[in-house]
Image: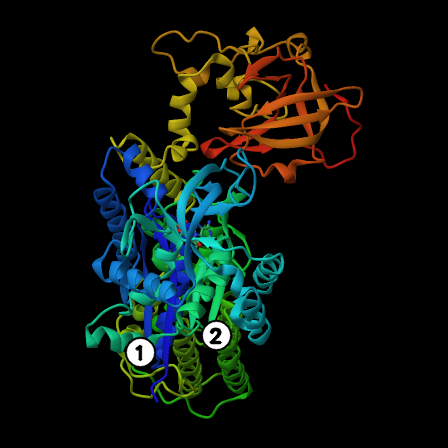
Amino acid sequence: MTERYYLTTPIYYVNARPHLGHAYSTIVCDAIARRKRALRVETWFLTGTDEHGQKIERSAKKAGSTPEEFAAKISAEFSESWKRLGLAPDDFIRTTEERHHRGVQKLFKELKDRGYIYKGHYTGQYCVSDEAYVEGEPGAICPDCGRLTETVKEENYFFKLSAFEKPLLDLYERRPDFIAPESTRREVLSFVRGGLKDLSVSRTSFTWGIPVPGDEKHVIYVWLDALANYITALGYGSDDAASLEKFKNFWPANVHLIGKEISRFHCVYWPAFLMAAGIALPGQVRANGWLLFDHTKMSKSRGNVVRAESVAEVLGVDALRYFLLREIPFGQDGSFTFDALVQRYNGDLANGYGNLVSRVVNMMHKFFAGVVPEAGKPTEAEETLRAKATAVIPEFNRCFDNFDFSGALKVLWSLVADVDGYLTATAPWKKPEGRSDAEQAALQARVLATAAEAIRIITALVYPVLPASADIVWRQLGQGEIAGAAKDNFLSGIIWGGLKPGTKFGEPAPLFPRAEKDAVTRMEQLEAENNKSAVEAVGGPIEMDEVKTAPAEVQKKVAEAAPAAEVKSAAPVPTAPAVPASATATASAPAATTPAAVPAGQPAAEEKTFITIDDFSKVELRVAQIIVAERIPKADKLLRLEVDLGDEKRQILAGIAQYYEPEKLIGRKIIIVANLAPRTMRGLVSHGMLLAASLEGGVPVLAGFHEEVPLGARLK
Ligand code: ME8
């Protein structure tokens, strides 16, 4: 029987442009799909866009567009971005497509006909950003994203989710690998053990969605709509035999790969819907961790996003793929920084694999006119290398197929290092005195044939991660086009000895040129330019939230339009500049911090203004501890803090809500400007200001201490 493999990414919301977080999940699936195809497994890799719901309807309105036009535009940005990045899904589904519409209505009808959907009234809280129902009173904050929920009072259809509490718990018990990793499984388990209530699966207060069949004033709840993509894309709901055949062949999916924040929808709602409809369950829901940028989850609403294209343009797509898969242990959160990326690139790709290939290919041309010689009788060194490569193959496979991409690449790169070491030890480019020409030729033949064979194995294994670069190397090794070889099952039977004597090498070609010092600056510039044009785009689809943490130039523009105290990054406070938004306290910055007037035509940078120690001593900086931190309804930037100064407690409002989870701030020791004139914001009085470093894009990092310091201590 043909082995088949179906894997999916989440379908992405079209309320904002694609960023590296989306690319991460899609790249992981692309690498898995490429490996499966190379193993001759019949593979189907699906991605797409999630286009309905209140959030999209509102975003479209904000952009002055119809939901249809708006969704089409951003959906195209996703599919074009994937093309530019060389990602090759087998299908890209849009939830606005007719095939999906039909399938979702069929699923709804099926659930209703089987008695799992009934009509009722919903009164409760709803988070539009997460499109999720939230427990709580009016004014409740969404526990997932921290935004204020809205009160919904509607006639709705309900799905009998409560009936699936036991079947779901049985499922998790019977199939422990249904949810991975373990941390996500535990979270889901505790959620379901907490009890399941019936779920509202239709809305009536807006229209951008798929109508409930037979009751068109209801639109189907966007998560029921979205989750169904995994089956509608395969033809579920179609009358067409060929489409249905695909459903028959590929469903159930082997893996739904998702970000961990949407595990409840995939591990609770989705299997419950499927069980209720009598449809087989997927093999596994596997969550990737979050890609962090500047310490927080990269996300459109936080605005701390990087585009994959900026990296691809400077270092190439393969560098990005390698970095994401090698640097971040899959399933865990991982930081993305341009510096770490360049370091990995230079270390592992330019100086590692790339340099190794170039040395061997060049020597093969130099010493053997590019034709692989007979290796001759192996010595202990060749036997050792061969044994190492032979051991690396199953270890790489085991790690990769277990979603431990980082482990797989690590073990493969230990082989790269060993081949490098072998070359250095045997030094085929050197001819010591006393060695005959014949001995020298034999050594060169043995070493180069052996090293080239090791490179062939490394390249075949790494192909799913570095498809474009592996193709270049494959040709240099005289093996032709790698995609063709992949179709011929070059992976499952890979063993030492595949590079035959007499094989004609291709011409040397550059692989990973060393990244120079300016690579980071270039990527940052590309990001800044892109963000600038995104912000300036009239009616552009970018969310308002994104403007808040746009790049430095945009921040500066915002700052220039704000009161003097907001432009305090020039303030000569010795430890760190103030948090921009919390600095919206009245313009109480000491007069001396205002930059001196610069005569026209003279570069401002050369002018330095100094303050005296007396000026500085006017600023009362003190150590405080956060004892209460909470969001303020309808103020998405501000947090309300209560801080303890030892001898007094105060309320301070700080513009850090987008960067810090309130509960994580409790107990933290910080530095405050204690003698700033009080200021009222949102009806609350702020008695002071926090200090923080202001990073690129205005992202704040709170100043603190490594040693124990008593509360109230003065900074001098
Ligand atoms: O949730 N790190 O869409 P979405 C890692 N439409 N992965 C990230 C990430 C980050 N910083 N940011 C985004 C939705 N992702 C729904 C899904 S599925 C039936 C409906 C990836 O546009 C990750 O896979 O908010 C995450 O789950 C997904 O993008 C969320 O995309």
Image disc number at residue 401: 2
Using the image, tell me which numbered label, if any, was put on residue 248. 1
Q: Position of residue 674 (x, y in %)?
A: 68, 17
Q: Quadrant of residue 428?
A: bottom left
Q: How is the image coloured?
A: rainbow
Q: Amino acid at mark 1?
A: Lys
- Picture residue at 38% right of the left edge, 28% below the top: 553
Q: Quadrant of residue 541?
A: top left
**Amino acid found under the numbered disc labelled 2:** Asp
Nearest to the observer: residue 28 or residue 386? 28
Q: Nearer the viewer, residue 356 or 660?
A: 660
Q: Is residue 365 left or right of residue 441?
A: left
| Secondary structure found at label 2 | helix
Q: Is residue 233 above or below residue 610?
A: below
Q: Quadrant of residue 543?
A: top left
Location of residue 201 with respect to 473 vertically, above or below: above
In the image, 641: left or right of 659?
Answer: right
